[in-house]
Amino acid sequence: MSFRKMITPIVIQIIFWIGVAVCVISGLGIMFHGTFVTFILGLMYVVIGPLMVRIYCELIILLFRIYDVLNDIKKNTNRG
């Protein structure tokens, strides 16, 4: 429990797959709920929803990668 290794990127991948499942299930529910307009909205939700979840998760992972690079830079400058 010394927090030497980050587990958050693994958790973010799990959150991504849960988000994709929620988008697909919700989109299918909207698609077959009623009119043609709701069908199109549900289809957009199925297509665009997972893409938006992916972008959001990648931005969070990017923060952790920046942190790793900054730690590498710090280690390299302290050797000096």
Image (tube, rainbow, N blue to C red):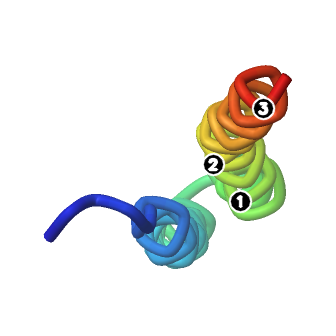
Q: Nearer the viewer, residue 35 or 29?
A: 29
| Identity of the residue drawn at 78% across and 32% down | 79
Secondary structure of the residue carrying tag 3 is helix
Kindly identify which residue carries mark 2: 57
| Identity of the residue drawn at 43% across and 67% down | 5
In this picture, is 6 found above or below 52? below
Residue 27 at x, y percent in the picture: 58, 64
Q: Nearer the viewer, residue 23 or 36?
A: 23
Kindly identify which residue carries mark 1: 50
| Identity of the residue drawn at 76% across and 39% down | 72
Q: CA distance from mark 2 to mark 3?
A: 34 Å
Q: Is residue 28 visible?
A: no
The answer to the question of whether label 2 and label 3 lie on touching residues, with beta carbons closer than 8 A, is no
Q: Which amino acid lies under the numbered mark 3 shown in the image of this protein?
A: Arg
Q: Is residue 57 visible?
A: yes
Q: Quadrant of residue 76?
A: top right
Kindly identify which residue carries mark 3: 79
Residue 23 placement, left or right of 3? right
